[in-house]
Image (tube, rainbow, N blue to C red):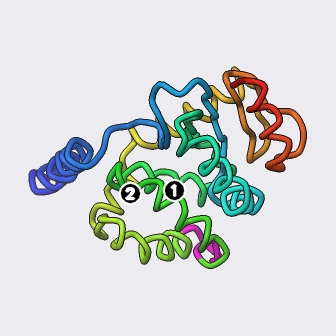
Amino acid sequence: MKKIIYILLFFLLSINAFAGENYKLSDITEGNENAKIKIYSYQSLTCPHCASFHAKVYPLLKKDYIDTGIAKIYFKHFPLDLAALNASKIAQCVNKEKRISFLDHLYKTQESWIRGEKIEDINQNLKKSVKQFGLNEDDFDKCLAFEDVENYILNSRIEAVQKFKIKSTPTLVINDEPFKGTLEYKNIRKMLEKLI
C-alpha cells in the first residue's frame, strides 16, 4: 500500500514540476502587445475549416496586419471533440516560442494525425510529432494528464459561448465584436481597415 502511495505522489509531483518548468497557461498569440486591433480566433484543431483558414487567410493577416504591428492575434481553444482537446493540451505544453509553429504543423498535417478508430490511436499520432517541438514522450503523457491545462482550455470554450455566443469554428472576434460574414480575407480586411 505504501508503495502505491509513493508512486502516486511521485507521479503528481512530476506533473507539477513539469507544469512549472515548461509552460505558463496563457493564450497562444502573435503580434505587437500594444496593437490597436485584437483578433481572437476561436478554433478547433480537428476542424477542416480551421485548417483552411490557417493555411489561406492567416498568412495574409500576418503579413498585412500582424507583422506590421497593427493587429495582435490570439488563438483561442474551442475544441469540438476529444482529439481536438488533447491536441490543444499539447499545444499549451509545447515551449512558448514554438507554439505558433506547432499550430502550423497540426493544421498542415491534420488529415494524417486525426486518423484512428480510437482516441488512443490519435494520441499516438500526435505523440510522433512532438519531439521536433521540444516535448518528449513522458512530457506528452504528463501534459494529457494535467488537469490545469484541461481546465484552462475548457474554460476558454465556456467563456466564448457565454460572452460571444460562439457555436462553430473558426470564429473571429475583432476588438470584442464577433465577425459576421464569411471568413474570406477581403471581408476581414474591410472590417480591419475601418478600425485603423
User: Which residue: 47% across, 75% down?
Assistant: 124
Q: Nearer the viewer, mark 2 or mark 1?
A: 2
Q: Which residue is mark 2?
A: 98
Q: Which residue is mark 1?
A: 86
Q: Residues within 10 Å of mark 2 (few under 14, many from 20)?
A: some
State how far apart marks 2 and 1 are (Cα): 17 Å
With 128 as the anchor, is 187 left or right in this view? right
Give the x, y percent position of residue 35: 53, 28
Q: Nearer the viewer, residue 154 or 44?
A: 44
Q: Earlier in the sequence, mark 2 or mark 1?
A: 1
Tell me, yes or no, whether the highlighted magenta stretch contains residue 116. Answer: yes
Q: Quadrant of the C terminus?
A: top right
Stretch of the chain drawn in magenta: 113-119
Mark 1: amino acid: Asn
Label 2, secondary structure: give it: helix
Mark 2: amino acid: Lys
The label on residue 155 is none
Give the x, y percent position of residue 100: 48, 54
Is label 2 in contact with label 1 (beta carbons under 8 Å)?
no
Q: Residue furthest right?
A: 181
Classify residue 72 by image quadrant.
Answer: top right
User: Which residue: 35% across, 52% down?
Assistant: 97
With 4 as the anchor, is 156 left or right in this view? right
